[in-house]
Image: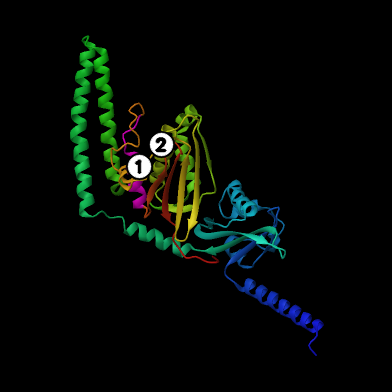
């Protein structure tokens, strides 16, 4: 006889069977899973974690630092990722490296909020998958696509010739002007000429840098973008301090990149944010968002902004020797965005601007994430 009691018993049996099947799947899966409680302490893990980052049942009860050591991440950085997931309920992805007995392996780490039966936040789930083979394929692909075509070679040769041909007469003019000063010439006029020479020298150097983005590019490797940003900030320390600028950033991923080149992009975008500031001290925000097969980075400032509603005006900002503003009192040659665009395109991404006058500026760029996706 079908009674409420019998139906409840059947439902209970189905739940037990489902839990048993789930446990069996987790125990046999090659995907490693770690469950953290709300205090970021390991409360459970799957057997696959032993082979991935050497976590065993004895690791249960250990803190998050125990995982950070195994995946070569600073404890503070991993904690920041986990707190973003726990407190904001978001999902994050991060590739991490592990070296053991001279062998380097790459793991894709996904962080997901864990919820209890009442849908209340109860912790964080870390999912690990070995992606070493995929990483090696991507590195090989980037290396094989590096050779220049004939057009790029011609551009490089032209820029090198122009750089060489222009620098020599500039050095000669400087020498003659120094002789003029020594013989009692008008110091004020000579100083203006020196300034123009310095400006031309900077233009030539920038043109040379632009032409060598492909020909003298560095090795593509997986690097934490937070590390790249830190290098860029160290080079801008003086201008940041003098302007009272503040910079904040969210958790940033590791991606396949040319570290010196992406450092140059961050330097250029942050320097522009400081240079074209408004009446208040610059506040700069750097963030990254995972969108399918790519990461979208955003550098936002509270500066004076500009009008890029017209597509032609927007595109002009990325041309060589085109300045964002007509304020001649501000230093610069108008090559920073052009170089940044060429670097991002070399990385397989795109770059663009979102801005309105008086409302600050957002510069966005994408870099391919690469690899397969799981547990979307």
Name of the residue lying farthest toward the bottom: 1
Quarter of the image with the C terminus in it:
bottom right
Residue 125 appearing in the image: yes
- Circles 2 and 1: CB distance less than 8 Å? yes
- Residue 19: numbered disc: none
Q: Decide whether residue 337 is among the magenta residues.
A: yes
Relative to 353, 15 lies left or right: right
Tell me the SS state at disc 1: helix
**Where in the figure is residue 248, as x and y percent of width and height?**
53, 40
Q: Nearer the viewer, residue 221 or 346?
A: 346
Dot 2, how many residues are within 10 Å of its Cα: few (below 14), some (14-19), or many (20+)?
some
Q: Which residue is mark 2?
A: 272
Which residue is pictured at 64% across the width and 68% down the height?
A: 47
**Where in the figure is residue 231, as x and y percent of width and height?**
46, 40
Quarter of the view holding residue 42: bottom right
Q: Which residue is mark 1?
A: 337
**Where in the figure is residue 218, as x and y percent of width and height?**
36, 48
Which residue is pictured at 36% across the width and 61% down the height?
A: 141
Quarter of the image with the N terminus in it:
bottom right
Q: Nearer the viewer, residue 117 or 309?
A: 309
**Where in the figure is residue 59, as x and y percent of width and height?**
68, 59
Tell me the SS state at disc 2: helix
Characterize the magenta stretch by its predominant secondary structure: helix
Q: Which residues are magenta?
A: 331-346
Which residue is pictured at 41% across the width and 49% down the height?
A: 365
Q: Is residue 179 above or below residue 341?
A: above
Relative to 47, 179 lies left or right: left
Dot 1, how many residues are within 10 Å of its Cα: few (below 14), some (14-19), or many (20+)?
many
How many angstroms separate mark 2 from mark 1 (CA)? 9 Å
Relative to 214, 52 lies left or right: right
């Amino acid at each position: 006889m079908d009674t409420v009691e019998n139906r409840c018993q059947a439902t209970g049996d189905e739940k037990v069977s489902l839990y048993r099947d789930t446990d069996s799947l987790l125990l046999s899966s090659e995907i490693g899973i770690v469950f953290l409680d709300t205090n970021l302490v390991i409360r459970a893990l799957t057997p696959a974690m032993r082979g991935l980052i050497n976590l065993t049942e004895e690791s249960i009860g250990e803190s998050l630092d125990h995982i950070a050591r195994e995946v070569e991440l600073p404890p503070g950085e991993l904690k920041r990722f986990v707190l973003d997931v726990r407190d904001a309920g978001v999902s994050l992805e991060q590739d991490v490296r592990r070296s053991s007995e001279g062998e380097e392996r790459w793991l894709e780490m996904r962080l997901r909020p864990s919820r209890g039966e009442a849908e209340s936040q109860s912790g964080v789930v870390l999912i690990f998958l070995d992606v070493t083979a995929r990483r090696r394929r991507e590195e090989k692909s980037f290396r094989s696509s590096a050779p220049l075509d004939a057009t790029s070679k011609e551009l490089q040769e032209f820029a090198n010739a122009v750089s060489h041909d222009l620098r020599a007469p500039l050095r000669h003019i400087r020498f003659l002007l120094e002789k003029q000063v020594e013989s009692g010439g008008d110091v004020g006029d000579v100083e203006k000429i020196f300034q123009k020479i310095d400006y031309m020298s900077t233009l030539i150097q920038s043109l040379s840098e632009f032409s060598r983005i492909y020909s003298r590019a560095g090795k593509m490797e997986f690097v934490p973008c937070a590390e790249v940003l830190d290098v860029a900030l160290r080079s801008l320390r003086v201008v940041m301090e003098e302007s009272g600028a503040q910079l904040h950033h969210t958790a940033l991923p590791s991606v396949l990149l040319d570290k010196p080149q992406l450092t140059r992009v961050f330097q250029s975008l942050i320097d522009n944010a400081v240079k074209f500031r408004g009446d208040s001290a610059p506040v700069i925000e750097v963030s990254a968002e995972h969108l399918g097969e790519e990461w979208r980075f955003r550098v936002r400032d509270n500066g004076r902004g500009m009008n890029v509603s017209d597509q032609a005006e927007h595109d002009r900002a990325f041309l060589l020797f085109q300045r964002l503003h007509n304020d001649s009192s501000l230093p610069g040659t108008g090559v920073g965005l052009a170089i940044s665009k060429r670097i991002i395109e070399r990385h397989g991404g795109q770059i663009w601007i979102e801005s309105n006058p008086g409302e600050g500026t957002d510069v966005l760029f994408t870099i391919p994430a690469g690899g397969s996706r799981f547990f979307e």
